[in-house]
Amino acid sequence: HGTGIEEVDLGSHGRWLMTTVVVANEDLRRALTESVEVRLLDPRWLKDWSGDASVSAAVRLDAGPSLSRYYTYLPMGEDCTAPFRGCIHAPFSTKLARTDLSYAVPLNRLFFDASARCVVEALRFIGRGGIDAAPEVSIDLLAWDVPHAHRLVKAMQADGLDPLTSPLVRAVSKRGAADWTGLGEIYSWDDTNRSVITSKLLMSCTDARLLPELDRARVDRLDKLAQHVGRTSGLEPGT
């Protein structure tokens, strides 16, 4: 299935990295049929739909405020947030009010899984130097809400990636500022209340791979994901 990656400049609304995957017609027909059979979709969808579908995921590249939102041609309600710090667009089945999405609809689940594939493609693209992105960008893509993280893990595994060991997180270490590592091998070390064993000292005398300076919310999201996928301790030593 085809994949496309592009940088999109929206002027005052920021610069974004957008990844798009194509969902094949045969997969769509299967999901449409199942959705109609369980009475979660109007049968007219089967009659009216033809061809493939495109699903996109986007993450902000600049330092502006991040946005988490689902789109289905138009933005969904403000409370209908994507499972990561970014946006997802797909031809979802939704109610007229467009306030939320149902994960029970097989068609929507197909698109959710496709959005996870988009994120994996974006992570790979950033990791191989396809674009000069701040460390926060890969964190925003990777740190999915735990209730939906199984979809990201499934997409990773299908692409031969292991969330604990594959180099998807940009770390700082004595090797330099672009040392990529896995969730099982990185730590958070906040120097705020440390005057002796600082991150600089720690990296100079050990092989520690540390997260770059991030806001607390990003660290917490990544920590929850890491423990969800099998890390036995928190990102901060001793937790």
Image (cartoon, helix red, strand yellow):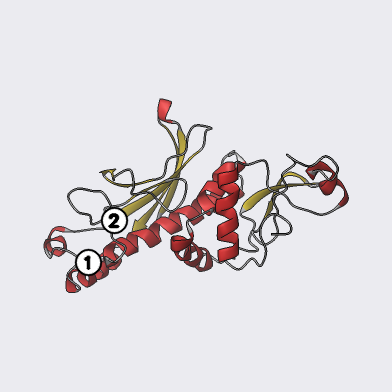
Residue 42: % across, % down: 14, 63
User: Which quadrant would residue 10 be assigned to in this image?
Assistant: top left
Per the image, the residue denoted by label 2 is 101
Crowding at label 2, few (<14), some or many (≥20) Cα neighbours within 10 Å?
some
The location of residue 3, given as percent across then percent down, is 42, 53
Closest to the observer: 128 or 102? 102
Amino acid residing under circle 1: Leu
The single residue placed furthest to the front in the displayed view is 193
Q: Which mark is residue 21?
A: none
What secondary structure is marked by label 2?
A: loop
Look at the image and tell me in which quarter the N terminus lies: bottom left
- Crowd class of label 1 (few under 14; some 14 to 19; many from 20; radius 10 Å): many
Q: Is residue 150 visible?
A: yes
Q: Earlier in the sequence, mark 1 or mark 2?
A: 1
Residue located beneath label 1 in the image: 32
Residue closest to the eye, 192 or 65: 192
Q: Residue at x 47, y 53 (%)?
A: 119
